[in-house]
Amino acid sequence: MANTIDLKSEDRSADSILSWLEGRDADLARQAVAARADGRLLDLTAALPEADRIEILTFDDEAGREVVRHTASHAMAQAVQQLHPGTLLAIGPAIEDGFYYDFDTSVTFGPEDLEKIEARMAEIVKAALPIARKEMPRAEAIQFFRERSEKYKVELLEDLPDETVTLYSQGDFVDLCRGPHLPSTGRLKAFKLLNTAGAYWRGDERNPMLQRIYGTAFATQEQLDEHLRLRKEAARRDHRLLGRELDLFSLPEQLGGGLALWHPKGALMRYLIEEFWRKEHLKRGYELVFSPHIARARLWESSGHLSFFREGMYGPMMIEDEEYRIKPMNCPFHVLIYKSQLRSYRELPIRYAELGTVYRYERSGVLHGLLRVRGFTQDDAHIICTPDQIHDEIKGCLDFGLFLMHAFGYEQLEMDLSVRGEADHDKYMGSDDEWEIAERSLMEALESRGLAYKRAPGEAIFYGPKIDIKLKDAMGRLWQGPTIQFDFNLTSRFNMEYVGADGERHTPLMVHRALFGSLDRFFGGYIEHTGGAFPLWLSPVQVRILPIADRHHDYAQQVASQLREAGVRIEVDDRKATTGAKIRDGETQKIPYLLIVGDREQSAGTVAVRARSEGDLGPKPLAEFIAAIREELGPPRS
RNA sequence: GCCGGCGUAGCUCAGUUGGAAGAGCGGCUGAUUUGUAAUCAGUUGGUCGCGGGUUCGAAUCCUGCCGCCGGCUCCA
């Protein structure tokens, strides 16, 4: 947390914040990276501000981390320019967990280059170069960078609105930068360059391709080591590796990019997830529907998808001279079900839910395991209701989403409320009234549940505002979770109506809602979250029985049939292998319980229980074991 | 799609200067009858991603495709 110091009675004669702080609190001065007063970030080299209070930022503050990483990115850029003169600089910001810098250079950076650059950075750090801030009129800065042929910097400057800009320099290196920065390169403690990648200038593929180097920096070597350990752990948990090791799914080349096969164990898990999902929906008053994979192109014209989602859709196929398309979304089908009759307000709310498989074109370069595919199943639902009902419906969606995520062990959630931008209301569908009621119902739902959320103006989709829930996984990474979106587009395009109590026709409100989003992606993320160690209710094999020798096979089968009767998914490892090898295989397969049975168990009618990653729990009567796990055999309860 | 890297047995990976395709794991067979994370032996397994070229000779060099990986962009 930021250290706030009252300045009112302080002696402000020191020539910088840093020297003032050194006289006051040497410890804090060592850890300080920047300061903040009146909401403005300041370099430690700046003079003490007029403000009444000052916050001293350290690496523990988010803004402080950014300062450290941004300074690291400058040190990297300096190292690159020293090693490869003529390299042009694009941008080099701090990002979540690290930083990057984009370069325009004729050399191609490989892993060896990263080591060399890192070594040079270490020299720059050792030299403890003072970092100086300089204000300059924009025109002068343009002239300065033009002389150095830094065309990207010139372009950035030309787009800046401010008449005065700031430059930061350290040794022979100068960069356009808002700052703040550490007072000296010597204050960088622990950093590491991670990988290289191509990146378009300003993210636009019509622009030149630059070379990006990613790195990260921390306040201490221990923190950096921990971060690198987590990265390694994440790589070890990669769902593509676990998917093969646990025989859950595959994406064979012969099948085509972005198309997955669910193997029996993965399919069983998916079945269990879907069964849970369906039951929970029925419990909450949803009605399940099914829809086909293709539809006349005209339907997609009516819905507008052929205009605003065209690039995501696969090409036409002709059926009896009529153009059809594979569905990229389920919404129009649900709308047609709604429109199959004239609806009364008494029927509302209507909640249609479907596990609908959709196909979307994704460029080959973005495909990634199950997380990014071309065919996937959405857990889609559309709620159609009156304005009176909308508040309760949104709360219902939110509660449902939170329940489901908790059921899968996601405890840390972040909420975004995406609303219209201030201006430009023309580009959005729906009336001001509709937007107001929609935004209010979303906001109230979040607030009634005491959830902290981030309001994001301008982030709404053109057809309505939405809540996005993000999940933090076991390795601290954020994933897209449930989304609750208003849709003013389809209600209007399909002229959806209901007859109100007044006998008049009204346009209902429609909410599009997905909780898993994509079952495929959710499953991929869940594999990484759990590392393949699934809870009992989802484990394809819940218990494996390991007879010690052949003479125990009969007893093992007896144990197996009793467990099977109790509804446990079991296997008997009757291979001719040592018990050690069987245990190792069971642990590798991440089976929750291994039951070892030998002479002692056979004569006592017990099983020796070994729990996944907990080890030997000793012998237990079988009935006792069954009673102990019975509660966890089924899905979580609401 | 673009930039960069990679592609050798089911998996993980060696393969020197262009000169007879290898190991471990897995699979199969046999022996061992096993007590809490790998018993031993034998054996099987290859269009060296695909096509074209250079060469007396190509896994190795050149070239065109395909796929995968890290990113860019977009999003579930």
Image (cartoon, coloured by chain):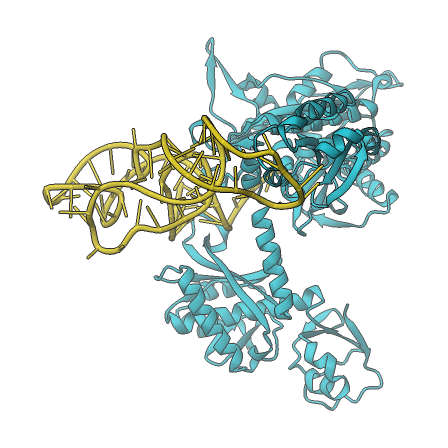
Chain colours: A cyan, B yellow
Residue A574 vertical placement versus A435 (above, below): above
Relative to A10, is A165 on the left or the right? left
Q: List x then y, in percent, for residue A10.
A: 81, 86
| Above or below, comparing residue A7 to residue A162 in the picture | below
Which residue is at 83% across, 21% downward?
A: A348
Q: Nearer the viewer, residue A62 or A52?
A: A62
Residue A526 picture quarter: top right
- The residue that appears at 67% across and 47% down in the rendered structure is A458
Seen in the image, is A86 located left or right of residue A60? left
Image: A269 above or below A92: above
Quadrant of the image occupied by residue A66: bottom right
Q: Farthest residue in the top direction?
A: A320
Q: Position of residue A498 (x, y in %)?
A: 80, 18
Q: Name the residue nearer the viewer: A505 or A540.
A: A540
Taking depth in this image into account, of A271 and A100 the one nearest to the observer is A271
Looking at the image, how many numbered discs can be counted on the residues? 0
Residue A32 visible within the image:
yes
User: Compared with residue A40, is residue A424 higher up or lower down, i.e. above or below?
Assistant: above
Quadrant of the rendering where the C terminus of chain A is positioned: top right
Q: Position of residue A143 (x, y in %)?
A: 45, 73
